[in-house]
């Protein structure tokens, strides 16, 4: 009898020691632990989102300055003006119709500067071009990268515009004896900031650039055709040049992009 009771007590003590050594938490403690982890994840996600918003808001605006303009050799303002006049008088024939649908290409070279300590990578985009408050073409911007604290990045872009529309507007401006020419380039472009080769989420910039000059001085001194058809026109050589580029973060979704018409309203 004594040996049987002692054996039972030994098995009970062994089971108690095994259960105590396993340290399995009760179900209620497990639920509390999961809730704590979930709240921690949500908290860190909110902190990261706030820091990202503050970081983006403190970004210094990149600057873009137009350096040179080069027209394709097929563009001639005088010839296009004569063709437009002949078409209006009904004496142009088929040539006038051909010029009526002609498009010309200009190569614009911009100097991009980034004063931030982070890199910015821009995606390819199509921006609108306006002259005399009227849309005349589009600019194709390639994908490019601005390294941190860089000031020597050149960005060549190609502008495609309607030659008859430009001719009509320029001739109208000259006929009205206006002295100031202003080209407007506007639209939206996607960008992504990089910190130590780590890409942050995409943001959308709204760009509105106004480039103006007193072009009557050039017309009187060199002639319209020589200015338009020269190999490359350096902006620094123009007598009176003003460049104003407004760049701001567009908080709308990337599906709702800012168009040139919205800037012209």
Image (cartoon, rainbow, N blue to C red):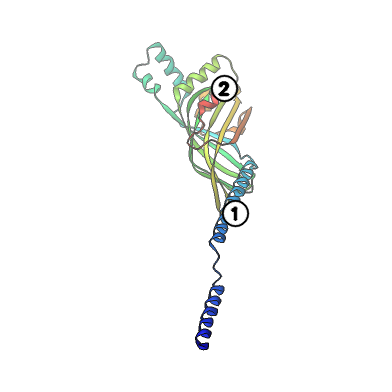
In this view of the protein, can residue 232 be seen by the observer?
Answer: no
- Residue that mark 2 sits on: 219
In this view of the protein, can residue 159 be seen by the observer?
Answer: yes
Q: Secondary structure at mark 1?
A: helix
Identify which residue, 25 or 116, lies in the foreground.
25
Image point 55% across, 76% down: which residue? Answer: 16
Q: Residue 155, position in %: x, y? A: 54, 41
User: Residue 210 falls in which quadrant of the image?
Assistant: top right
Identify which residue, 62 or 44, lies in the foreground.
44
Q: Residue furthest top?
A: 89
Q: Is residue 32 above or below residue 127?
A: below
- Estimate the spatial distance between the alpha carbons at disc 2 and disc 1, rounded to whole Å: 69 Å
Q: Residue furthest front?
A: 1
Identify which residue, 215 or 131, lies in the foreground.
131
Q: Residue 213, position in %: x, y? A: 60, 26
User: Residue 236 falls in which quadrant of the image?
Assistant: top right
CB atoms at circles 2 and 1 under 8 Å apart?
no
Image point 40% across, 15% down: which residue? Answer: 87
Residue density around tag 2, few if under 14, some if 14–19, many if 20 or more, within 10 Å: some
First reached walking from the N terminus: tag 2 or tag 1:
1
- Residue that mark 1 sits on: 40
Q: Is residue 78 above or below residue 196?
A: above
Q: How many marks?
A: 2
Q: Nearer the viewer, mark 2 or mark 1?
A: 1
Task: Indicate the quadrant containing the C terminus: top left, top right, bottom left or bottom right.
Answer: top right
Q: Secondary structure at mark 2?
A: helix
Identify which residue, 237 or 138, lies in the foreground.
138
Q: Residue 165, position in %: x, y? A: 46, 22
The answer to whether 240 appears left or right of 167 in the picture is right
């Amino acid at each position: 009898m004594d040996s049987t009771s002692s054996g039972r007590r030994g098995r009970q003590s062994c089971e108690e020691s095994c259960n105590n050594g396993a340290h399995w938490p009760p179900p209620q403690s497990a639920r509390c632990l999961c809730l704590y982890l979930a709240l921690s994840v949500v908290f860190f996600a909110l902190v990261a989102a706030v820091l990202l918003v503050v970081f983006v808001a403190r970004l210094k605006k990149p600057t873009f300055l137009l350096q040179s303009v080069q027209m394709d050799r097929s563009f001639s303002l005088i010839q296009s003006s004569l063709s437009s006049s002949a078409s209006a008088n009904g004496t142009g024939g088929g040539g006038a119709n051909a010029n009526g649908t002609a498009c010309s290409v200009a190569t614009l070279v911009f100097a991009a500067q980034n004063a931030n300590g982070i890199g910015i990578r821009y995606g390819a985009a199509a921006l609108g071009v306006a002259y005399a408050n009227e849309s005349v073409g589009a600019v194709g911007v390639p994908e490019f990268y601005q390294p941190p604290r860089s000031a020597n990045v050149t960005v060549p872009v190609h502008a495609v515009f309607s030659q008859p529309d430009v001719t009509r507007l320029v001739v109208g401006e000259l006929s009205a004896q206006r002295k100031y020419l202003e080209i407007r380039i506007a639209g939206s472009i996607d960008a992504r900031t990089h910190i130590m080769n780590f890409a942050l989420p995409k943001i959308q910039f709204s760009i509105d650039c106004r480039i103006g000059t007193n072009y009557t001085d050039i017309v009187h001194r060199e002639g319209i055709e020589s200015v338009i058809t020269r190999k490359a026109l350096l902006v620094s050589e123009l007598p009176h040049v003003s460049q104003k580029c407004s760049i701001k973060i567009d908080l709308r979704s990337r599906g709702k992009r800012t168009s040139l018409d919205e800037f012209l309203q």
